[in-house]
Amino acid sequence: MKNENNENYSCSRDIQLFQGHLQSSLEENHQALSKEPAFYKEMFETLVENAPVGMYVLEDATYSYINHQFCQLVGYTKEELVGDKVALDKLIHPDDLSLLREGVHKETGERGAQVPYHVRAFKKDGSLIHAAVHATKAIVNGKRMIFGTVVDITKEVIAHVKLKENKERFQSLFYNNPDAIFTFDMDGNFIDANPGCKALTGYSTNELLEMSFIPLIVPEDLPIAVHNFEEAKQGATKNYEVSIMCKNGEQKYLDITNFPMRSGEEVIGAYGIAKDITEKLEHRRLMEDLAFYDPLTKLPNRKLFEDRLQQVAKLSEGSHHQYAVLFLDMDRFKVINDSLGHHVGDEFLKAVSRRLKEIVHEAATISRFAGDEFVILFPDTDEEEVILLAERLNQAMAEPFDVMGHSVSTSVSIGIALNDGEKESVEELIKNADTAMYYTKKHERNSYTVYSKELEVEAAYKLTIEKDLKAAIKNLEFLLYYQPIVDLNNGELRAMEALIRWNHPNLGFISPDQFIPIAEESGQIIPIGNWVLHAACSQNKAWQDLGHPPFKVCVNVSTIQLRHPSFVETVSMVLKETGLEAKWLELEVTESVLIEDTKLLKENLMKLKAIGISMAIDDFGTGCTSLSYLRQFSFDHVKIDRSFIEDMKQNLNGMAIASTIISLAHKLNIGVIAEGIEEDEQLAFLKKEGCDEGQGYYFSRPLPAESLKLPIVYENINKI
């Protein structure tokens, strides 16, 4: 900055020299004028008028002469300035007038002494300039005069101010910055270090100035630090991360940026900025754990599993090494979760992961995908070895688990997929294992299935159904069939159960057992269920409008529908739109619904009862309904599952169970409906036991509404 100040104000020295020469010239000219007045006067005036600096002569604080350059500086004409027409206090800034007056009135006692000073002057247009003034006192023709020069130094002053501000700003940023900022010489020694360096390293500034950066860097990161310092010396800016050892022995992780320090075109060292990223790095590692590991079991998650499977696939390319994926799904896990609580379910999953680690060798990767799904990767194996392992897994997982004081028994369904030498993608191999697992779960639990192309056909069929379900309502492909529910005492019609059918344009009629589970898995059961509810209520109202004796229409409702926040509102809207009274609608729920520990589900059941809709439990006796649920929700009917009615043909177990259900329900003031009645003997037994209502092929198969002939009365029922 000193160099710049000297450069900015070098003009002042030049002016002083010029003014000295001018003084001598004036004296010489004064002598010459007396000899040859005309010639020398003209030469003097030409010299002064064309001088590159403003020049003036003051007599008694009034301008008696100014040159052209002076006029250019202040914007006034000679006529406006000479003779006190424009006073000095109008030209000079008020705060600088004292400097001017001191220069004008100060008695130096020395002829020709110069009085330099800087002032701010107003131009005629009101703008402000900075001026360097050099005044000299002299006596000419017996008169006391002050003559001087004026130079516009506005640009130099502004540059000086900006330079000063920049320096102050730099010092403020350097010394007050919370980050560590430092400078190195070409050997890596500290030249300067701000207070942030001490806070970061524990070393004082004086201690740092006696050392280089090398002792601070941990040995394993030293090559990185040296390389990037050398790059900075070559003119490159480098950002990198290293670890340092602080004065107190603590290790910290830093993010450092090095960039060259220049003097002109020459690099004379390096600057550096360091940030403490220890906490950030620890947080990053935690995020990586969350990104790649299951937080509950600490096993690799799906993302990490897929990455490792991809690596195994690449390593196996061009070789005969086989690798396998085993997809495991715990049987009955939902029952464990619902009956014992989610906290017990979580501990159970941890126990499962520990047992898997005990069985599977270390070369394999065990991963938890979601819920109770575990997937295992074997990098080098064959089908025989994998099957032996699957059998061990089935056996080991069937052994009871001791979980928080509970003895928990379960089993595992396993799907196996091996690479077949072709280039299967990671997604394909996992999907194949998943497909094989679902086959096991559906047909033979606590076992395993090796994937084959035949299973893929079934999976493709399932995907076709799922895809085409989306357009089935819009394309009017769904139909409702109705099956009568008859009073077993007098044969009168009490209700019609609405049963959905799907007439697929290419596959023909598809059984509800095939597409309803898929609709539930994909979430499409909501619009399908709403369509069934609306169509059934509309049909029942149409029968009533035709004058037939009123009866209920029964509609099956899934757990997913009941859990939907707007289900009760949807039912109320359907009743309003169709004009059907609530008492002529009965909703059937499966027995498994009642073990769902969901507050919203239970609230919805109570609200439906409150608006006058009757409720029935379908397939009663096949699940694990608690008697408290029957009492709590005040069900209107229980429906004995058809499997017990069919069992009456072979042995007495079906009769005993049906008799028990009827007796139990009646004691709770709940009506009983028997499903699947086909023979006289079944009907006779149910009537004897006091069963209230029944349905089945004995009375009618499910038929479209137009095929049913109302009114329906089965008078011959009294003969049984």
Image: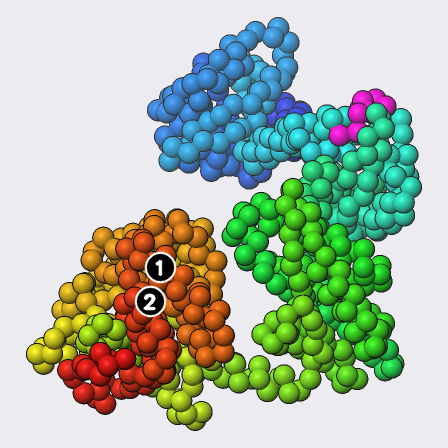
Give the answer, above or below, for where 395 lies relative to 605: below
Q: Nearer the viewer, residue 668 or 706?
A: 668
Q: In which quadrant of the rendered view does residue 38 lie? A: top right
Report the residue marked by disc 2.
Answer: 689
Dot 1 or dot 2: first in sequence order is: 1
- Please tell me whether the stretch drawn in magenta is mainly helix, strand or loop: helix
Q: Is mark 2 on a helix, strand or loop?
A: loop
Q: What element carries label 1?
A: helix
Report the residue marked by disc 1.
Answer: 663
Give the answer, above or below, for where 631 lies relative to 249: below
Q: Which amino acid does label 2 sit on?
A: Glu
Q: In which quadrant of the rendered view does residue 587 lie? A: bottom left
**Callout 1–callout 2 Cβ contact below 8 Å:** yes
Q: Which colour scheme is used?
A: rainbow
268 in magenta: no
Question: Which residue is rendered at x = 52% and y = 11% of the image?
Answer: 102
Q: Nearer the viewer, residue 209 or 579?
A: 579
Question: Which residue is rendered at x = 36% and y = 30% of the image?
Answer: 80
Crowdedness near tag 2: few (<14), some (14–19) or many (≥20) residues, C-alpha within 10 Å: some
Q: Is residue 100 left or right of residue 298?
A: left
Residue 10 x/y as whole percent: 68, 32
Q: Which quadrant is home to the C terminus?
A: bottom left
Residue 464 x/y as whole percent: 49, 84
Q: In which quadrant of the rendered view does residue 19 lie? A: top right
Crowdedness near tag 1: few (<14), some (14–19) or many (≥20) residues, C-alpha within 10 Å: some
- Residue 353 is labelled as none
Q: Is residue 195 left or right of residue 624?
A: right
Residue 376 x/y as whole percent: 74, 65
* Part of the protein shown in magenta: 200-207
